[in-house]
Image (tube, rainbow, N blue to C red):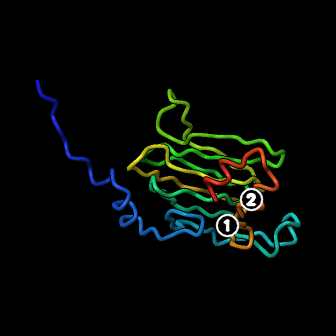
């Protein structure tokens, strides 16, 4: 008996989600859209000294990477929770403050060591890429205190390699 061939569903394509969710280009790579920013904020007097100014309580975004893209190494001043939504697994690379490199796969299958969500600790360097060719990963990210571009730092390849020579290959790939 011949296998039945089916057409992929529209939602199996990155461009469907980019249009449907009104995503736009993100400076670190991929596409995003902020979907929530709390109206209330924390006054800077009640935040750690690493923050300059007040911050919203919480922010949330959708974030999509196509397989030919990567999320370039960057770091934030707040913890960030990454949630898998749909698509292929996404491999996260986290360089912690103690210099340790951790890899995590966000995805749909716990039997393949995927997790549905992961908390990226504040001040850690983070980069990511889609693990399957000709695919995409759609995730959401939540931050508290909320995201502000003042708290976002893009990694420089040379600076990161000087600081973490033991992780040179992945730094080259994700910067």
Residue 62's x, y, as percent?
A: 51, 60
Please, is residue 18 above or below residue 141 in the view? Answer: below
Check the picture and name the quadrant holding the N terminus.
top left
Q: Mark number for residue 147?
A: 1
Q: Residue at x 87, y 71 (%)?
A: 45
Q: Mark number for residue 78?
A: 2
Q: Residues within 10 Å of mark 1 (few under 14, many from 20)?
A: many
Secondary structure beneath disc 1? Answer: loop
Q: Nearer the viewer, residue 170 or 117?
A: 170
Q: Nearer the viewer, residue 44 or 97?
A: 97
Residue 162's x, y, as percent?
A: 81, 56
Q: Residue at x 51, y 65 (%)?
A: 32
Residue 27's x, y, as percent?
A: 58, 69
Q: In the figure, is residue 100 to the left or right of 9? A: right
Q: Nearer the viewer, residue 53 or 18?
A: 18
Secondary structure beneath disc 2? Answer: loop
Question: Disc 2, disc 1: CB below 8 Å?
Answer: yes
Q: Residue at x 60, y 50 (%)?
A: 82
Residue 118's x, y, as percent?
A: 63, 44
Q: Residue at x 33, y 60 (%)?
A: 16
Q: Nearer the viewer, residue 107 or 61?
A: 107
| Figure quadrant of residue 54 | bottom right
Check the picture and name the quadrant holding the C terminus.
bottom right
């Amino acid at each position: 008996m011949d296998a039945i061939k089916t057409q992929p569903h529209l939602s199996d394509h990155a461009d469907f989600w980019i249009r449907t969710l009104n995503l736009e280009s993100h400076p670190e790579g991929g596409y995003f859209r902020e979907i929530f920013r709390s109206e209330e904020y924390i006054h800077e007097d009640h935040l750690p000294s690493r923050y300059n100014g007040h911050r919203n309580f919480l922010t949330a975004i959708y974030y999509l990477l196509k397989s030919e893209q990567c999320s370039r190494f960057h770091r934030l001043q707040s913890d960030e929770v990454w949630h898998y939504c749909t698509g292929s697994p996404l491999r996260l690379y986290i360089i912690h403050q103690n210099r340790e490199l951790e890899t995590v796969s966000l995805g749909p299958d716990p039997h393949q060591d995927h997790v549905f969500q992961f908390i990226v600790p504040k001040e850690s360097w983070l980069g990511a890429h889609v693990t399957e060719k000709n695919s995409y990963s759609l995730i959401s990210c939540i931050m508290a205190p909320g995201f502000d571009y003042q708290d976002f730092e893009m990694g420089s390849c040379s600076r990161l390699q000087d600081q973490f020579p033991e992780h040179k290959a992945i730094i080259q790939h994700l910067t």
